[in-house]
Amino acid sequence: TYAICILSRFARHPLTLAFLEQNACWVVTRMLVLTADVVVLRTAKASVVDRDSEYIESLNAGFSFIRFALMRDFSPRWVVQSVDAGLLRAVCRLAPLLEKQLHQFGRDCVRHILADTLPKHLVYLSVVKVVDREMNDIDDVTLEKGVDGSWLAGDWRSLQEVLTLRRSVAKISKEEKGSSRTLSQSCSSYTYQCGKMAPKKELQRCGGCLNVFYCSKQCQKEAWPNHRALCRLRTEDRATQTAEDRNALFPKADAQFFRELLSTDAGLHLGHMQALAKREFPSEKQGEYFALCLDYTDLRYPTGTCSLKDIRTYTAPPMNGEDEDEEVVVEHNKEMVRMVLRDPKAYTFIEATFAWGERRMSRNFMIRPNIWDKQVPQMVNFTGKKTCANEDVEENTPGFIKDLM
């Protein structure tokens, strides 16, 4: 395992990707699981395991490899692979031992996996599903003997809290299967006052981009002037890319979940952003011209932290060394901006930033209609802890409650 760590130490190197594509994450995680079985059994018999034993060295090597492997490109695939192989169960069972026996670097690796890598990847449905399944499979006795009360207990609870938030979004789609929200699609001539909802099989899909649906030829004809440019870009993109290239960032199910997540969290942050607009853009009266920005890379705020940009002067974040065709992405962004400017009340423009390997990735989405003027109930945050960097929360909340009483 140390040999694999050394040979795959360079990010984005062909050899590193070769190891990962040959299921190195799954193999090394299985080694950790089997080693955990031995170590826990020996600890139960002898009460202590020599820090320099081959078992502890195996754990050091394994967690070192996993910590960095889960930060490589295509990281959602490696996270799913490792968690599926039993990573969480191994960490749970070994938690009391790791604090005393593992070297400091090894402990740092374990904490980084649990407190940083896994929570950041819970924006992907594939990761949410496998983490949820694995956590549910760990019984109360194992939790009590393992991670509960250990040095990792706080990180474990934080991961569970983020999982609960993401699971609630995923559960919405699952529970409403068969309802209009999941199986139905709206007619894409929404800007022309149609917006009819119907099952996809009853609508007509655009034969060019394959991304939008219409309820009739008339609606398609009316929407075509607004759709033409983006349709051409998407059609050209499909013609030049393979299926694997089109799914480079995440598969279709993850992309759909991401839209659900953004739609939900944009609503949660709307009150914060409306207050932010009054503070930073006091002269702006038309909120539909804001691009809503959600950043999921700050773990202090599980539902993301928000900011605003003016869509009329909007510039997308740099590509950050991504492998995708930068010209295509830039042109897509420009066309989405043009669509919003043509009819700002019809769309909400959202810029999402999330972790993909060791990089911060940004992608733009549009949801319908524009949510800016939606009435948000005024709620008092009694925790005294900000749920977003832009939330206006008094730090002396206990004093506020006392005064209120």
Image (cartoon, rainbow, N blue to C red):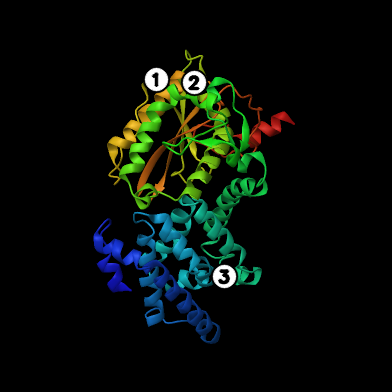
Task: Name which residue lies at 53% across and 35% down.
Answer: 204
Residue at image mark 3: 146
Alpha carbon distance from label 2 to label 3:
53 Å
**Does residue 265 appear in this view?**
yes
Residue depicted at x 34% and y 64%: 20
Mark 3 or mark 1: name the one nearer the start of the chain.
3
Q: Is residue 104 above or below residue 336?
A: below
Q: Which tag is nearer the camera, tag 2 or tag 3?
A: 2
Camera sees residue 392: no
Q: Which mark is residue 344?
A: 2
Of residues 270 and 101, the one drawn nearer to the viewer in this rendering:
270
Say above or below: 279 vs 24. Answer: above
Residue at x 47%, y 12% (from the top left corner): 283
Whether the residues at callouts 1 and 2 have beta carbons within 8 Å, the answer is: no
- Contact between marks 2 and 3 (CB within 8 A): the answer is no
In the rendered structure, which amino acid carries the disc numbered 1? Answer: Arg
The residue nearer to you, when weighing 30 against 344, is 344
Q: Which mark is residue 312?
A: 1
* Residue 220 x/y as whole percent: 50, 27
